[in-house]
Amino acid sequence: MKYPIKFKAAILEKINRPLKLKNIIYEGPLQDGQVLVKLKYSGICGKQIEEIDGLGGKDPFLPHLLGHEGSGEVIDKAKNVKKIKIGDFVVLHWRKGSGNQSLTPRYYNKKKIINAGWVTTFNEYAVVSENRVTRIEKKANFKTSALYGCAITTGCGVIFNQTKLNELTNIAIIGCGGIGLFAVQSAKLFNPKNLIAIDINDNNLKLAKKMGANVTINSKKQNLPVRIKHLLKSKNLDYVISCTGNKNAIIDGLNILSTPGKLIQVGVPKKNLKLEVNFWDIMHCKDIIGSLGGNSYPDKDIPFFRTLEKKRKLKINPLISKIFDFKDINRAITFFKKNNSGRVLIKF
């Protein structure tokens, strides 16, 4: 591979502003543990919206690149990279897998440094750390494979890695966007007694019904605690999977959860969000735990979830709400904010 290389990237220069689509340069060569990937597709995740809107607090790395789930082809690799080879098709993910953790890359735009993390996907090419890529088979579909970088491994991972479901379980999933809908599909595989999908968007609830939920509740239109009490009568709501960072939704989840019961927080809340908790409930085993990416390990979980897809136990295409060309990435972000149903993809 000849360096330097020039390519287009969507750059976050200022908080609460559209991304700037510009040519950037990577001077090369690759450092230890680095892989050069030509992107095919990228997903848009709520984490990127959080970064763009500044919900995580002050951003000391501006200007920088974004994106943490995608698919592409390996174009070059450092000599010490053994996990993959040039020409391999890969998923790009933010969760650490096996392999080296490299230094983060440095890009330039007119001699100005453009920062980046160990993986970015809002760019035509990406220098990625070896432990942020997982090889997939050559016949894999790049479009659906992109979602294994976050949405699938998080939504499916929280069910397979952090719950113990069976036919007697009552489980509610709050927030039926991309991650929540994959959680619904995974939970359905265990045939729980009640699989309840909760959202304020009727389109999301219709999708959740198709994906296996036997009960759907629009919490904006119905009294959620009353509806749950009437549905379950004296039975426990064993799990609440909160796939949104919305404060009111998290409170709803805690209120409907039984004692004992377990709330697993998957969605990213606003930084420094504080809630009051009844410690009598905590003492009596109302558990609240966090979930970072469904506690997934990409090298193990991506192949397993791909097996579910091949067996038609995991549906991906119905959850892709729209695909935008890379040049229209700001339109894609606006669409995602207004129509948070399923997953929005960027095509390169």
Image (spheres, rainbow, N blue to C red):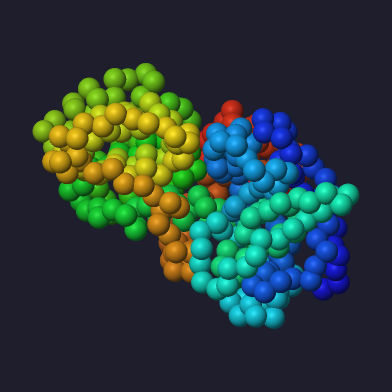
User: Could you tell me which residue is drawn at 58 percent across and 68 percent down?
Assistant: 101
Left-right relation of 118 to 302:
right
Residue 171 visible from this viewpoint: yes
Residue 302 falls left or right of residue 8:
left
Across and down, in percent, residue 308 comes to 43, 61
Residue 99, position as x, y percentages in the image: 55, 73
Q: Position of residue 38 (x, y in %)?
A: 73, 62
Residue farthest right in this picture: 110
Q: Quadrant of the N terminus?
A: bottom right
Can residue 41 be seen in this snapshot? no
Q: What residue do we see at 64% from left, 72% from top?
A: 33
Q: Quadrant of residue 93?
A: bottom right
Which of the 4 image quadrants contains residue 282? top left
Closer to the camera, 102 or 225?
102
Q: Relative to 20, say whether 111 is above or below.
A: below
- For the image shown, how many numbered marks are present on the structure? 0
Q: Residue at the location (52% across, 45% down)?
A: 318
Relative to 340, residue 289 above or below: below
Q: Return the x and y of residue 95 as percentages of the image width and height.
A: 51, 59
